[in-house]
Amino acid sequence: MGRLFGTDGVRGVANADLTAEMALGLSVAAAHVLAEAGTFEGHKPTAVVGRDPRASGEFLEAAMVAGLASAGVDVLRVGVLPTPAVAHLTGALGADLGVMLSASHNAMPDNGIKFFARGGHKLADELEDRIEAVYDAHRHGEPWERPTGAGVGRVRSYEEGFEQYVAHLLAVLPNRLDGLKIVLDEAHGAASGVSPEAFARAGAQVVTIGAEPDGLNINDGCGSTHMDKLKAAVVEHGADLGIAHDGDADRCLAVDHTGEEVDGDQILAVLALAMRERSALRSDTVVATVMSNLGFKLAMERAGIRLVQTAVGDRYVLEEMKEHGYALGGEQSGHVIILDHATTGDGTLTGLLLAARVAQTGRTLRELASVMERLPQVLINVPDVDKSRVRTSADLAAAVSEAERELGETGRVLLRPSGTEPLVRVMVEAADIEQARSVAGRLADAVKSALG
């Protein structure tokens, strides 16, 4: 698997790449590294462990819990809950460590391990590196100190986590959702229980699809990566809007009453205006990535809201928000972070706040989302090129300058080397789709010529 920790924890095919032995070993290593860092000093450590409904999560959870307890950590098993719920409970319960077993929007055979530090925040990169190093050393025979007797960890189920998380979500809402009919697509995932419960308690009439997980059907033709069923259901039921989550419910996409998709950029735009109205948008600033649609940037400029853009990835959005104290950020993919109430993207919270804005204003989601116009966006992947020379090629720089002159202020060009493959991504936005395709095609040819 190469380096174990990626941008979102450890992930791979369960029982092939990601085995029970690995889960146990990583849990022991995590306990030792955090102990060495002083996290457990002066008290018996506690960890919160949750998972999504994947079948493989059952044995991976057992291995993770066994490893932590064998290293002297008390474990609270919260069962099937969303990633943001595990992060919230880690903070709310004063736990020293949180563990989520999920591969998010990936297909069922995959699974993953994500660690949270005290407070529910992502573990620092240097701690992940140290955990990986200790895991590797133990795997190759280096002994580790094992507690005995009363020093071993105790394990118990913490079923109260479900209710605590739902109560947290409802406490954040600025107003109720009475009078709204909402279709929820739960992707047969981790939010299949808590999301319908929260929306119903908030006053909405709820219709659910994709809310019957069986361990095998997570993300299968449903959820935020497969929106067609939700679009059809919203129209069929005459609903006011639809909300789609992914497998671990850290993202949210939406559908308006006509069945049209509302993406993460549009959701951010709606929430930014709502938060500013109630003086919750600190510094009148929203954080997004460089892949956000130009229409979002233009909409924020018109509204007098400052946009800060980061590299692609919700981790970079979160880092920028934490460093400067911003309250709202996210990605086009539907990862939306409301930092006053969550330490990670929270799809259920995002959906609730979006619905609350519809209920509060009496306007349709279609009207609210029209605050920004999505400009046509064309993306071309150019394979088998020397991606390291993207920023140094004079010929390519000239081609980009020519394209930018042609597009003017109503278009945008972005060339981005892939982080994992030998290819360059060419993205062009323009007011007209044919112009976007034409410019993107010429730039792709220029990439091949200059870097091939």
Image (cartoon, rainbow, N blue to C red):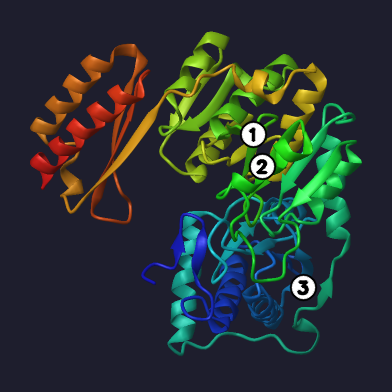
Instruction: Name the amino acid type tagged 1.
Output: Gly
List x then y, in percent, for residue 446: 13, 35
Would you name the residue on which mark 2 appears? Answer: 232
The span from disc 2 to disc 3 (Cα, nearest Å) is: 46 Å
Would you name the residue on which mark 1 appears? Answer: 259
- Residue visible at 69% across and 83% down in the picture: 70
Check the image and report above or below for 445 versus 132.
above
Would you name the residue on which mark 3 appears? Answer: 74
* Label 1: which secondary element: loop
Instruction: Name the amino acid type tagged 3.
Output: Asp
Crowd rating for badge 2 (residues with CA inside 10 Å; few <14, some 14–19, many 20+)? some
Crowd rating for badge 3 (residues with CA inside 10 Å; few <14, some 14–19, many 20+)? many
The residue at the far front in this view is: 236
Check the image and report above or below for 282 versus 231.
above
List x then y, in percent, for residue 308: 48, 25
Check the image and report above or below for 305 versus 166.
above
- Residue visible at 62% across and 30% down in the picture: 267
The span from disc 1 to disc 2 (Cα, nearest Å) is: 7 Å
In front: 96, or 251?
A: 251
Count of numbered circles in the view = 3
The span from disc 3 to disc 1 (Cα, nearest Å) is: 47 Å
